[in-house]
Image (cartoon, rainbow, N blue to C red):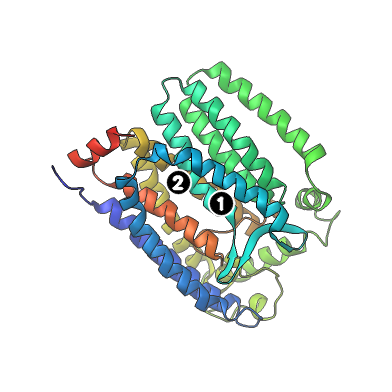
Amino acid sequence: MKTRKLNYKTFLIFIVFCILSFLGYINLESAVINSRYTRLPILQINWITIAIALIIITPVIFERIHLGKILIPGYILIISLLVLLLIFGERWGGSRRWFSTPIGGFQPSEFVKPFMIVLYSYLYSHGVDSSKSSLINLILTLPVVLLIVLEPDFGTGMVFVFTFIMYYVIAEKNKRRLLGFFILFLILILLVYTFGLKPYQKERITAFLDPSKNPDTYYHTQQSVTMVASGGLFGKGYQRGLGNLYGYIPADHTDFVLAVFAEEEGFFGMLFFYSLWFILFAINISIIRKRSGMKKWLSLGVFSTFFIQFTINVGMVIGLLPVTGLPLPFFTYGGSSTASNAILIGILLWSSLNNKKRLEVLSSQY
C-alpha cells in the first residue's frame, strides 16, 4: 500500500499562504500604528500560528474520517449556532455576528464556509442525479443564508449564494434549467433589494451608483480610492501613508486594510499582491481540472469562496463595487476568518495530493 505523495502544487499553495499571511501581518502593523488597536498584530501572530497547525491537520483529518458520517450532526450544529447567535451573540453596531469568548470573538459564519463546501462536494460526488443533488443543496443552503442575513451580514450571505451558483453551473448540464435558474435568481435579487435590504444597505448601493446622492455613505469609498491612487508606482513607504497615519479612512484594519497596503507599496506592490492570488487561483483551477470526485468538488468550493471574497473586497477598495464589509482573506484581521481560511487551504492541499493507491482506497469509502 503506497503512501501519499506531495507535489509542487502542494508546496506552492503553502508558500503563497505564508507570503500572503506575512504581508497581511506587516500591513496590519502599519494599519493600527496610530489607533487604539495596536495589540491586534500580536494577536494575529497567534492566529497565524494556529492557522499553520490547521493547514497541517486538515489533510490528515480528511484522510482518516468518513465525511458522510459527520454531515448531518455538523449541519444541525451550524444551524443551532447561527440561531443562538441571533439571541446571545455580542451586539455591535446593531448586528450580532459573533460570540464573545475569553480568547476573542467567535464568528460561526466563518466556519460554516468550509463545512458547506464539504457538504456540497459530498452530495455532488455521490449523487446519481446532479439535479436532485442541486435541489438538496439549495434546500440546505437557504436556512444558512437566511440566518446569516438576519445577523445582518449580507456580504457573507453572498459568499454562500455565489458558491452554490458555481456548484450548480458546473453540475447542471441542462441548458434550459440553467436559463430558468438564472431568471428566477434575477427575480429573487429584485425582491431582496426591494423588501429584504435595510435602509443603510440600500444607501451603500445608491451611493455607489451616484455618490452625489449619498456623499456621507460614499465617504469610505472615496477615501479608499484616494489612498490607492496616492500610492503611485512605488508607494509612500512602509508606515508612511498619510491616509493611514492621519486616520482618513475608518476600518483600515478590517474592510479597507488593502487601501493601506496600496498607499504604502504603490502599483508594483499591488502587482505583486495580485500575482500571488493569480498563482493561487491558477493552481486551484488546475486541481479542479485534473481531479475527480470529492477532490474536484472540494477544490471548486475553495476557489469559489476565495474568489468571491477577493473580488468583492478588492472591488470595494478601488471603488468598482459597493461597500459590503466582506473581509480580505489573509489580510483582514480576525481569528475566525484566519482559522476558516486556513481550513480552506488545508482542503486545497489535500485535493492537490497525488492519487496514490492508499488515497484511492480511502476515497472510495466516500
Label 1 residue SS: helix
State how many labels appear.
Answer: 2
Above/below status of 177 relative to 263: above
Q: Is residue 203 left or right of residue 271?
A: right
The disc label shown at residue 302, or none: 2
Residue 263 seen in the figure: yes
Q: In the rendering, at what x and y percent does residue 46 appear?
A: 46, 73
Q: In the rendering, at what x and y percent does residue 37 appear?
A: 63, 78
Q: Quadrant of the N terminus?
A: top left
Residue 255 seen in the figure: no
Three-letter code, disc 2: Val
Q: In the rendering, at what x and y percent does residue 319 appear?
A: 67, 56
Q: Could you tell me which residue is drawn at 60 percent across and 30 percent down?
A: 139
Q: Could you tell me which residue is drawn at 66 percent across and 81 percent down?
A: 36
Above/below status of 52 relative to 365: below
Front-most of 166 and 136?
136
Label 2 residue SS: helix
Three-letter code, disc 1: Gln
The disc label shown at residue 309, or none: 1
Q: In the rendering, at what x and y percent does residue 216 appear?
A: 83, 62
